[in-house]
Amino acid sequence: MEKKNIDWGNLGFSYMPTDKRYISNYRDGVWDQGTLTEDATVTISECAGVLQYAQTVFEGLKAYTTQDGRIVTFRPDLNAERLEQSAKRLEMPVFPRDRFVDAVIQTVKANSVYVPPYGTGATLYIRPYLFGTNPVIGVKPADEYQFRVFCTPVGPYFKGGVKPLTIRVSDFDRAAPNGTGHIKAGLNYAMSMHAIVTAHQEGYDENMYLDAATRTKVEETGGANFLFVTKDNKVVTPKSASILPSITRRSLLYVAKEYLGLEVEEREVPFEEVQEFAECGLCGTAAVISPVGKIVDHGKEICLPSGMEEMGAITKKLYDTLTGIQMGRLEAPEGWIHTVE
């Protein structure tokens, strides 16, 4: 089938409606069979649980055109698992994992003409989400919910090449020790808006959040996990009960160990140790790895040896290997790649 007439090389990272989206409703304790629809609007009560008490969780993943022309998605089963954990934490009904993967495949297949061609740098971003729909005025979970999946073609996260970021140590806390930092809830992102807006106003690209209990250990940014490289090429990522378990980070750690033969550590990272690292990156679905060149702690600059011009050598190897797996240039571990068509 012929692709849509889109200038793939000039796509931004923004929403473009596509032809179909998936919807399933939860009523009387059960999910209906679900369907694809052309209607991109959502109609709910003014008193819906999602509007009153932020009862919503979501996921983000991508579909790619591989080097041999297949359309594939990357590890959607892990997104299904994470959505399940998020829903349980907010007392929402779990959308079954197998149905989640099937809904993603259905949605991508129905919008295959929007999957960017191989080599354009663009991809199809997929957004599954779940929210409370019936009126709720007392503070309690909703009784009815809707699960939806839409997708939109997006351009490469880095237009004009990868440039290392400058980030600041934030005075705000991202998540409480026993809060919701470990799930992908909309409310986590709402509370980070002020911090990221003020960071941009002050000339920084992102925030580094420290642990809320002691403010001595590195956690994550508003939308990505940290990944560090030591001067002897060991890959280190922070460990905390309030960090979102990133699927990209999990995949990169596997790649570091099994493909590149590097030593890997997932552990607490004291902030005072940051100045000792050789490289730093932010990992997530959108960019895979965004390199960090400078971290500013209330005026004190920590300049990474990898510099402000390009990715560090190990970060680049990690990026190239994982994107090679996603795009079909390298053989993937069993179960990582789900072929759509």
Image: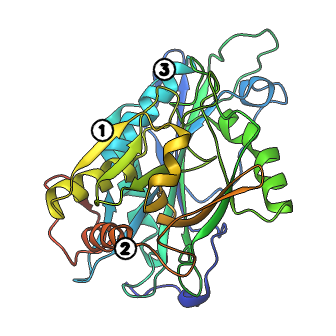
Q: Residue 333: x and y, percent?
A: 15, 57
Q: CA distance from mark 3 to mark 1?
A: 17 Å
Q: Are marks 3 and 1 in contact (CB under 8 Å)?
A: no
Q: Is the residue marked by circle 1 packed among few (<14), some (14-19), or many (20+) residues within 10 Å? A: few
Q: In the rendered view, would you say 108 is above or below 181? A: below
Q: Is the residue marked by circle 2 packed among few (<14), some (14-19), or many (20+) residues within 10 Å? A: some
Residue type, label 2: Lys
Q: In the rendered view, would you say 121 is above or below 238? A: below
What kind of element bears circle 3? Answer: helix
Q: In the rendered view, would you say 96 is above or below 89? A: below
Instruction: Give the residue pinned by disc 2.
Output: 316
Q: Residue 256: x and y, percent?
A: 24, 58
Instruction: Give the residue pinned by disc 3.
Output: 88
Residue type, label 3: Lys
Instruction: Give the residue pinned by disc 1.
Output: 98
Q: CA distance from mark 2 to mark 1?
A: 34 Å
Residue type, label 1: Asp
Q: CA distance from mark 2 to mark 3?
A: 37 Å
Q: Residue 320: x and y, percent?
A: 32, 74
Q: Quadrant of the C terminus?
A: bottom left
Q: Is residue 5 among the parts visible in the rendering? A: no
